[in-house]
Image (tube, rainbow, N blue to C red):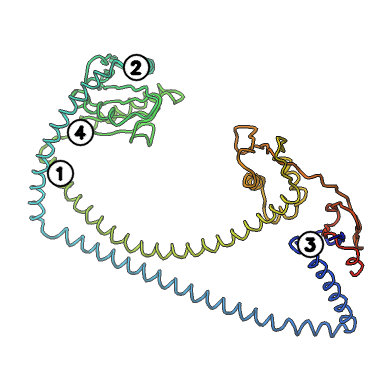
Amino acid sequence: MSMKIINITIPDDKIIDISGFSLEENYMMLKIGSECLLEGRKAVVSLTQKEIYEKIKNESRVEFERLELGIIVEKEITKKMEEKMRNMYESQIEKLKSQIETKNAEIKSYELQNKDIIKAEVDKAREKYDLILNEKDKQVNRLSETYEKLVIQSHKSTSHKGSEGEKRFEEYADVFIDFKGFEIIDKHTQGGSGDFHLHFEEFDVLVDAKNYKKKVPVEQREKIKNDLQKNEHLNFGWLVSLNTSIDKFDKSPIMYEWINTRQCLVYINNLSSFEDPKKILRVVWFTCKELNRFIEEVNFDEEELTKLKDDRFKLMDKIRGFRKNIREINTSMNSTRNLIQLMDDELKSMLENETNEIISSNISLFEDWWKENIEITFDDRTVISTDLWTNFKQENKVIMREMDISGDKFKQYIKSKIPISNIILRSKNVNCAFEIKGIKLKNIVKEVLTNNMNENIIMNLDLEPIESPKAKKIIKPKLKKDNLDES
C-alpha cells in the first residue's frame, strides 16, 4: 500500500499522540475533523455575538450548578469527618487521663498500706539474694582464675601489640612528671595488676592500655574490674583505648563506672585521636582528684547501708507498679496507632496508584523513542549511553520538563532493554556512562520546516522530517495518491 506524508503545523506548546492509529484511521480522523470544523464555522457565522454568549452561558450553567453542588457535598463530608475524628481522639485522651489518675491513687494507697508485710517480704528477699550473691561471687572468682590462665597463655601472641600500646601510653603519661609524688610502675608482667600503676601523692591509679583495631570488648572491661577489686588499696582504674572505642561505654570520650563505694573505673575512648592526648589525661586526673575527696568522706555505718537497701527495695516496688501502668497505657495508645495506620495505608494506596500511572506514561514514551531511533545490529559496534541521552533530550525537551525525566531513569530504561552482557562499564562507578554493544542510532535525515500557518504536504519521499525550532509538526504516514486527492 503506497502512502502519502502530510505535514501539519501546530503550536509549539501543544502535544498530540497519534502514533497508534492505522493509515485509514488517520485519513478518517483528518476528514471528519476538517468537516466538523467547517460546519462549526458556518454555524457560528450565522449567530450574532449576543446569541453566542447566551448559548455558551446556558450550556455552562448546568455544569456550574453540578460543580457547586459537588463542592458543597465535599465540604459537608469533610466537616463531619473532622468532627468525628476530634470527638474520637478527645474521648481517648479523657479515658487515658482517668486511667492515669486512678493508677496514681492506687499507688498512693499501696504506699500507705501493709508496711509491716512489705518489710517482712523484703527481709526474706534480702536473705535470699545475699545467698545468691555469695554463690555468684564464688563463680566469678573461679571464672576469673580460669580467665587469667587463658590470658597468660595468649599473652605471647599479643605481647607485640601490647608493647606498642604501653610505650605510647608511657609517652602520654609524661604529662604528670611535674605532679607531686608521681611515679609510673610497670606491672604488665604481673598477673592481675594491669599494665601500669600510677602513684600520686593523693591517690594511686591502675592503668590498662589497649591498642586494638576494633572496639575493646566486654571481656577487657571485666578483666580490669577484677584487677581493681583485687588491689583494694587502689581507688581508681583507667581503661585506656588508644585507637578505638570501648564497647558499651562509648557514648562520650570519658565515662565512669563505680564498682563499689570506694573504687571507680574510668573509660577513655580513642585517646590518640585527640589533638592533645596529654591534656585529656590531665582532665581525667583532676576529675579523679575530686572524686577521691568524696570517697574519703563516705561513712560506712551499717545502719545507713541497711536504710539505703530498704529504700532501694521500696523504689523497685514502685518501679514495678509504674511499669504495669505504662503497659496498660501503651495498650490504649496502640489501638489509636492502629487507627492512624489504617488511614496511612489508604493514603499510601492512593499515592501508589498515582505513581503507577506516571511510571506507565514514562515507559510508553521510552518505548516509542527506542523503536524510532535504535536499530539492533548483532555485531561488536558500540554506542555510548551519553550520546543516546543527548539525542533523547533534544527530541523530548517539553515532555522531560513535564514528567521530570532524569538521566538516571533513562539509564535504567536502557539496561532493561538490552542484555547485561552487552553493557560495558567505563569506570567502577555504577553511576557513570557506559557503552552498549550490538545497537546503533538510525540514520534519520532531518529537515527544518518553518511555515507557521499553511499545511505542508511532502509526497513520494522516504524522508522523516524533524521538529522545527519554531513549531512542532505531526508526522503522518504515507497515503496512496488517490486518498490524498480525496482529502
Q: Can residue 178 be spotted in the picture?
A: no
The Cα–Cα distance between marks 3 and 2, rounded to whole angstroms, is 78 Å
Report the amino acid beneath label 4.
Asn
Tell me where residue 222 appears, x and y as whole percent: 25, 30
**Which residue in the structure is indicated by mark 4?**
260
The Cα–Cα distance between marks 2 and 4, rounded to whole angstroms, is 27 Å
Tell me where residue 201 appears, x and y as whole percent: 26, 19
The residue located at (18%, 52%) in the rendering is 317
Q: Earlier in the sequence, mark 1 or mark 3?
A: 3
Compare residues 321 and 139 and report the one nearer the observer.
139
Do tag 3 and tag 2 residues touch (Cβ < 8 Å)? no
Which is closer to the viewer, label 3 or label 2?
Answer: 3
Do tag 1 and tag 3 residues touch (Cβ < 8 Å)? no
Secondary structure, mark 3, is loop
Which is closer to the viewer, label 1 or label 3?
Answer: 3
The Cα–Cα distance between marks 1 and 3, rounded to whole angstroms, is 84 Å
- Choose top left, top right, bottom left or bottom right for residue 290: top left
Q: Is 275 placed left or right of 28 in the picture?
A: left
Seen in the picture, residue 41 relative to 252 is either above or below; the reply is: below
Report the amino acid beneath label 2.
Glu
- Choose top left, top right, bottom left or bottom right for residue 480: bottom right
Report the amino acid beneath label 1.
Lys
The residue located at (85%, 75%) in the rendering is 37
Compare residues 450 and 371 and report the one nearer the observer.
371
Mark 3 is surrounded, within 10 Å at the Cα level, by few (under 14), some (14 to 19) or many (20 or more) other residues, namely: few
Q: Earlier in the sequence, mark 4 or mark 1?
A: 4
**Which residue in the structure is indicated by mark 3?**
14
Quadrant location of the N terminus in the rendered image: bottom right
The residue located at (73%, 81%) in the rendering is 60
**Which residue in the structure is indicated by mark 2?**
166
Mark 1 is surrounded, within 10 Å at the Cα level, by few (under 14), some (14 to 19) or many (20 or more) other residues, namely: some
Q: Is 427 placed left or right of 20 in the picture?
A: left
